[in-house]
């Protein structure tokens, strides 16, 4: 495809195509909900959650309008179609839709403040990566941050200390032996799953969203073929 093309989808889901890849985002929809909930003039923040923020049911907190709270959570959940960086915070705060308090509402507003500062963020797939994936090995790569787990799965000798493990937990070991799965060690700081399970400091959060294939593309940038970013 020689020309950049854009196609809007339901609720602002947009796909931008160029010879170098595909960019998926929902910037227009994100702008609309930020305006709808009166947060256009709010300060931007660096992450969707405050690090080490402990959110609970807050039984002693002052209740807020549950309809308002649910109305803010719903759009955030939809945005996760192109914004995996919102998944953990949106899903966590969705737990408190029945009886939200001011503490919960402020936490959701924080996500909107993060969204305001990252309005042009989306998922990017480069043409080169798509081609390399198509010709790669049929083995499925799995990444562990525990060397002992890898050793247990790859060692044909059953260690005596592992005999108590249920047979179903040896499933991965069997897939390795059958060359269906290939295991790789990944250091903790490169563990992508952390972005879906815990609040992270700004530096590590920004590092991981890039590893997920997320990029910020301004409307001006989208008018010309995107350049492949060096990893």
Image: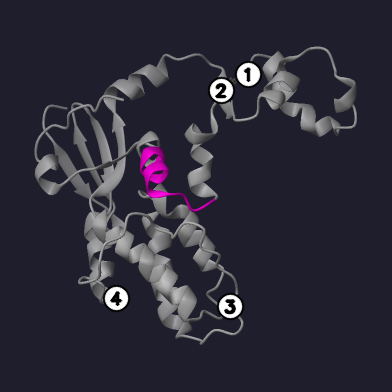
Left or right: residue 172 versus residue 18 is right
What residue is at 28 percent from the left and 68 percent from the top? 33
Numbered badge on residue 37: 4
Q: Position of residue 130 (x, y in %)?
A: 35, 24
The residues tagged by marks 3 and 1 sit, at their Cα atoms, a distance apart of 46 Å
Taking 137 as reference, is 109 above or below it?
A: below
The residues tagged by marks 4 and 2 sit, at their Cα atoms, a distance apart of 43 Å
Neighbourhood count class around disc 3 (C-alpha, 10 Å): few under 14, some 14–19, many 20 upward? some
The residues tagged by marks 2 and 1 sit, at their Cα atoms, a distance apart of 6 Å
What secondary structure characterizes most of the magenta part? helix
Q: Are marks 2 and 1 in contact (CB under 8 Å)?
A: yes
Q: Is 201 part of what is drawn in magenta? A: yes
Numbered badge on residue 140: 2
Q: Position of residue 4 (x, y in %)?
A: 13, 36
Neighbourhood count class around disc 4 (C-alpha, 10 Å): few under 14, some 14–19, many 20 upward? few
What residue is at 56 percent from the left and 17 percent from the top? 139
Q: Earlier in the sequence, mark 2 or mark 1?
A: 2
Q: Earlier in the sequence, mark 4 or mark 1?
A: 4
Neighbourhood count class around disc 2 (C-alpha, 10 Å): few under 14, some 14–19, many 20 upward? few
What residue is at 78 percent from the left and 27 percent from the top? 170
Q: Are marks 4 and 3 in contact (CB under 8 Å)?
A: no
Q: Position of residue 59 (x, y in %)?
A: 61, 82
Range of residues picked out in magenta: 198-208
* Residue pointed to by mark 1: 180
What residue is at 39 percent from the left and 34 percent from the top? 211
Name the secondary structure under disc 4: loop
* Residue pointed to by mark 3: 58
Name the secondary structure under disc 2: strand
Q: Is residue 152 visible?
A: yes
Q: Is residue 11 visible?
A: no
């Amino acid at each position: 495809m020689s020309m950049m093309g854009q196609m809007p989808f339901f609720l602002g889901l947009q796909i931008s195509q160029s010879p170098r890849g595909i960019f998926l985002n929902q910037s227009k929809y994100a702008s609309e909900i930020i305006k709808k909930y009166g947060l256009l003039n709010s300060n931007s923040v660096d992450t969707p959650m405050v690090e080490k923020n402990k959110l609970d049911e807050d039984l002693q907190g002052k209740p807020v309008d549950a309809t308002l709270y649910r109305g803010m959570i719903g759009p955030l959940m939809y945005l996760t179609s192109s914004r995996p960086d919102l998944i953990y915070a949106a899903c966590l705060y969705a737990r408190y839709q029945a009886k939200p308090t001011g503490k919960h509402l402020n936490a959701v507003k924080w996500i909107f403040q993060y969204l305001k500062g990252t309005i042009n963020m989306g998922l990017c797939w480069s043409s080169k990566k798509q081609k390399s994936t198509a010709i790669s090995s049929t083995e499925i790569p799995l990444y562990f941050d525990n060397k002992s787990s890898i050793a247990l799965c790859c060692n044909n000798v059953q260690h005596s200390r592992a005999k108590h493990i249920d047979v179903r937990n040896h499933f991965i070991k069997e897939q390795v032996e059958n060359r269906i799965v290939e295991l790789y060690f990944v250091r903790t700081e490169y563990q992508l799953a952390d972005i879906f399970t815990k609040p992270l400091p700004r530096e590590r959060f920004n590092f991981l969203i890039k590893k997920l294939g997320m990029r910020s593309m301004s409307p001006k940038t989208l008018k010309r073929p995107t350049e492949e970013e060096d990893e």
